[in-house]
Image (tube, helix red, strand yellow):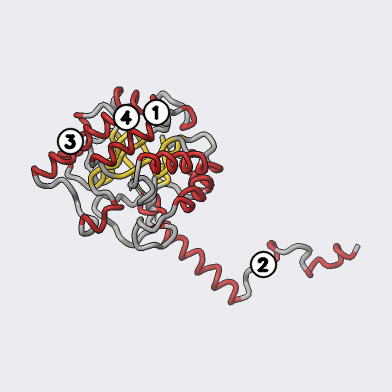
Amino acid sequence: MTKKAKASSLNIGSFAAMKAAGEKISMITAYDYAMGKCAVQAGIDLILIGDSLGMVVLGYDNTLQVSIEDMIHHSAAVRRGAPEAFIIIDMPFMSYHLSSIQAKENAARLLIGGGANAVKLEGGSASRVEAIKAIVDCEIPVCAHLGLTPQSVYKMGGYKVQGKSVADYEIIMAEALAVEAAGAFMLVLEGIPELLGRDISQSVKIPTIGIGAGRYTDGQVLVINDLLGQTDLRPKFVKTYSELNSEIIRALGEYNAEIKAGTFPAEEHVYYPITNIKDFEK
Ligand code: KIV
């Protein structure tokens, strides 16, 4: 890290200043106490409690089934591990689509229950822009999310790169300008060509955080399980920094084998081993 000492000192102004200074912003998802702690110790700038939770932790087929209760439960755990980190919590599918009142109520519930500093919601249509305005009007910072928006998986016909045609490029660019004008303080760009990621990042003043959006966004985010080698699918944009699942399986295999062989627990793992029973009897 450069000027700042730790994540605890960061706020929405810090991220704007980082963009202005050309300093890249690091974001990672986390879903529990232990990973919240690790993210802070690694010096990551901000933590996202993504609704990817549904797929990588809860085993759902997609993010649509994730509930507000799921999000609050996991966000609160991350907060306990990362008491001073800047945390963004995802608003689940259909928790902000029905009305401005619904969006405001659920944003407040997620923010307070999950101990987060900001909420994130997907999309840039007119009604999403209204939801952003309504939530910001309640003094709750909003991070927008455009491009490949996983809650639209059925509408998109799968998890496909967005913004490839000139017409789609223009729609996503217009949405980026609209969410900025609505008051979003940050914008996640997912699954778009590098050119569009670069052009949006140059066109908006708010920081952009890319995931599969190329090299020119103001920061990057990855799903922690992807980065740690804990997922089977390896999309092109993911860099796997560790093969943690292989290591977990190796360790569990060794544990299993030692139990079966009677070599675990060994004497050093035992309270008052029978070999020293006389000491205990004294
Ligand atoms: O849910 C999530 O993890 C996300 C990231 C992919 C940006 O929204």
Mark closer to the chain start, 4 or 3: 3
In the picture of the structure, the residue carrying the numbered disc 3 is: 174
Q: Type of residue at label 4? A: Gly
Between residue 62 and residue 242, name the one nearer to us.
62
Of badges 2 and 1, nearer the viewer stands 1
Instruction: Identify the image quadrant of residue 142.
Output: top left
- How dense is the environment of label 4, judged by Cα within 10 Å: few (below 14), some, or many (20 and up)? many
Q: Is residue 70 left or right of residue 213?
A: right
Instruction: Tell me the CA gap for discs 3 and 2.
Output: 65 Å
* Tag 3 secondary structure: helix
* Tag 4 secondary structure: loop
Pick the quarter of the image with the N terminus: top left
Residue 109: % across, % down: 48, 42
Of badges 3 and 2, nearer the viewer stands 3
Instruction: Tell me the CA gap for discs 2 and 1.
Output: 52 Å
Q: Is residue 159 left or right of residue 138?
A: left
Between residue 249 and residue 137, name the one nearer to us.
137
Mark closer to the chain start, 2 or 1: 1
Tell me: residue 214, above or below residue 23. Answer: below
In the picture of the structure, the residue carrying the numbered disc 4 is: 183
Residue 53: % across, % down: 41, 53
**Which residue occupies 30% across, 50% down?**
239
Pick the quarter of the image with the C terminus: bottom right
The reply to whether callout 2 and callout 4 are in contact (CB within 8 Å) is no
* Tag 1 secondary structure: helix
- How dense is the environment of label 3, judged by Cα within 10 Å: few (below 14), some, or many (20 and up)? some
Instruction: Tell me the CA gap for discs 4 and 3.
Output: 15 Å
In the picture of the structure, the residue carrying the numbered disc 2 is: 266
